Amino acid sequence: MTRIGIILGSTRPNRNGPQIGQWVLDTAAKRGDAEFELIDLRDHPLPHLDEPAPPMFGPSVHAHTRAWAERIAPFDGFVMVTPEYNGGVPGVLKNAIDHLCGEWTDKAVGFVSYGVNGGARAVVQLRTVCGTLGMADVGYQVSISLLTDFENHTTFTPREHHETALHKTLDQLLAWSTALEPLRRPVTPQIDEEGTHHVDERLSVTH
């Protein structure tokens, strides 16, 4: 069955992400068409990118990067739950993305964002980053306002249109995750009539 990781993109104290991430998980789990799992960046503390070589040239020399790669690699797609900080992506989320390369490639990604303006500008940046890594970012997204979608600015109160938007996002995410599955299969070397080995030069898991 398709596996989807729901990544909590903030590690700040008193963050709102866990409420939203749990709502995404609870809503998605009722569908029965995939396996969904929360991935909390607090459980994978990573230093500012400290790899001596770009991730595409792995394997990594650092245990923390290898552990993060092992966590991400088994999933077929992702939902990134992201706040917007000062008009952009949280540094901790961008750093976590930048630690890997092949583990993201040929996988689909959808976005659930939150902020004063619904987190839209963070998603614009993430689409560029994820597209550069060879991910298929789906068109639908969920935008949550800190001003109108939280009771007393602390308790997330999802409304019907949020759930509708989430299901549309998940519909696209699962369709694209399935469509990209052949590209994620391990590549078997081919031998031509002259005995020469040929392998696909696509990016593969590198950590």
Image: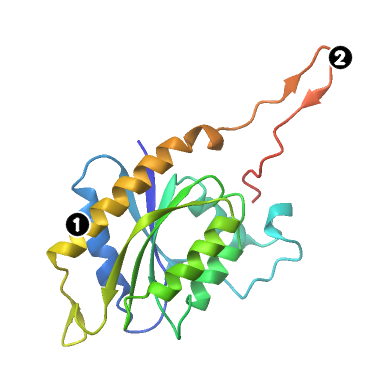
Quadrant where the N terminus is found in the figure: top left
**Residue holding disc 1:** 164
- At 52% from the left and 77% from the top, the residue drawn is 91
Question: Circle 1: is it few (<14), some (14-19), or many (20+) Cα within 10 Å?
Answer: few
Helix, strand or loop at mark 1:
helix
Tell me, yes or no, if residue 10 can be seen here: no
Q: Which residue is mark 2?
A: 194
Q: Amino acid at mark 2?
A: Glu
Q: Is residue 188 above or below residue 204?
A: above
User: The residue under label 1 is which amino acid type?
Assistant: Thr
Select label 1 or label 2 by which is in front: 1
- The picture places residue 67, in percent across and down from the top left corner, at 55, 57
- Name which quarter of the figure residue 177 lies in: top left
> Is 150 placed above or below 191 here?
below
Q: Secondary structure at mark 2?
A: loop
Earlier in the chain: of badge 1 and badge 2, it is 1
Q: Position of residue 184 (x, y in %)?
A: 54, 37
Question: Which residue is painted at 49% across and 53% down in the image?
Answer: 71
Marks 1 and 2, Cα distance to the nearest angstrom?
A: 57 Å
In this view of the protein, which residue sits in the foreground, 60 or 93? 93
Left or right of 69, for residue 191: right
Residue furthest top as drawn: 193
Image spot of residue 66 (x, y percent)? 60, 56
Mark 1 near mark 2, Cβ–Cβ under 8 Å? no
Residue at 29 percent of width and 77 percent of height: 16
- At horizontal 72% and vertical 21% (from top left) the residue drawn is 190
Image: 184 above or below 115 = above
